[in-house]
Amino acid sequence: MKHRMKKRSKKAGLPPGSLVLIGDQRHEPVKIVGLDYDESSCREKLDLSIEGCVALKDTPAVTWIHVEGLDVDVVRRLGEGFGLHPLTQEDLLNTDQRPKLEDFGDYLFVVLKMFLPSGNGSAGETLSEQVSLVVGPTWVISFVERERPVFDAVRERLKAGTGRTRKMGSDYLAYSLLDTVVDNYFVTLEVTGEAVESLEERLVLNPEPEVLKEVYALKHALIYLRKSVWPLREVVSSLARSESPLIQEATKLYLRDVYDHTIQVIDIIETFRDMASGMLDMYLSSLSNRMNEVMKVLTIIATIFIPLTFIAGLYGMNFSPEASPWNMPELKWRYGYPAVLLVMAAMSVGMLYFFKRKRWL
């Protein structure tokens, strides 16, 4: 957070539309992949140049330009070639935005978050990246922060000609990309759910301070997920109810399905949040139970030794058996010592039996 705020401070005082990259700087060159398709064919073009992207803008087929990596010069040149507003170009480089939808008339601009499992099985660690979609009449430009295989399934469907994508327009392609990102939420939440179950089991068996740290990390991760998904619900709802000519009526039906999936994701996140809150109570209860068990054992030991201490103290008094008529006859008895030990042992066993009958043990 401090690193991100430090980068955002570079924009202080700059006019609106100033292009400053806010996010992790990518050292690899930006990779641009283009697909130009219609119902009968699909042409994939790897390592496209900016000029090659602009040349595909006015083709009669639907064009998908996928940009992997963010660079100020690439965003500016693509923005100029496709007529993107300076504020759109600025938002493409600001990777800490909340999901949103903006209608600029001749194109739609959509921002959403993509989540990927970290791969180490930790419930509190999830990779988050920004995905930006610019939807035009016959073209879609997608921007991601780095190369990811998330949209590979959409690309393979286009090249194979399966599904409806090649028969529909750019709005359906945008829906397919949006649906892929939302479906990935379920994959991430499935991994998170497994980690949550493991964390609950560890809390019950061994509530250590390290587990408490993981619970707090999980809570923070779920809060971030919730903050990213809740606005997405409004984005998808706005797309499904949009009166823009760029969104066809046939596509709105599919967008409503994405909206339902988004609601399911929110419900799962809320469930996990409740479970995480319950984990804190479980941790405190486990510590209290462990302390109660320790105190119970110590109390039983102390209770057993109280009468034993009394007997040992009584016969440990320094009185001579001839000093007074009120003497202790057991002091002269040959078997007094083993008899006292036997009485003490019998009392201990009797008290243990009593505790067992009372189910205190």
Image (cartoon, rainbow, N blue to C red):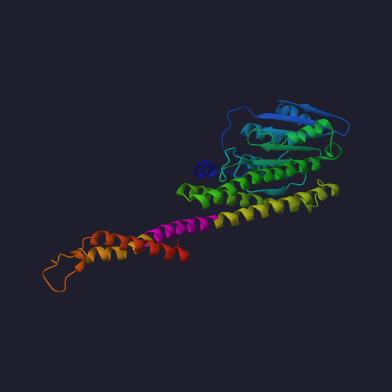
Query: Front-most of 314 and 297?
Result: 314
Q: In the displayed structure, does residue 262 sit left or right of residue 250?
A: left
Of all residues, the one furthest to the right in this rendering is 40
What secondary structure prevails in the magenta region? helix
Please state the horizontal and vertical placement of residue 12, each as a whole percent of the image. 53, 45
Q: Is residue 295 magenta?
A: yes
Q: Which residues are magenta?
A: 279-299
Is residue 110 rendered magenta in the image? Answer: no
Q: Residue at x 67, y 45 (%)?
A: 185
Quarter where residue 77 is shown: top right
Q: Nearer the viewer, residue 246 or 224?
A: 224
The answer to whether one can see residue 294 in this image is: yes
Residue found at x 77% / y 41%: 176
Pick whichever, 264 or 192, lies toward us.
192
Depth check: 240 or 326 in front?
326
Q: Is residue 234 something that shows in the picture?
A: no
Q: Is residue 263 left or right of residue 243?
A: left
On screen, residue 161 above or below 318 = above
Residue furthest left as drawn: 323
Q: Residue at x 35, y 62 (%)?
A: 346
Percent x, y of residue 310: 27, 66
Residue ranking furthest to the front: 334
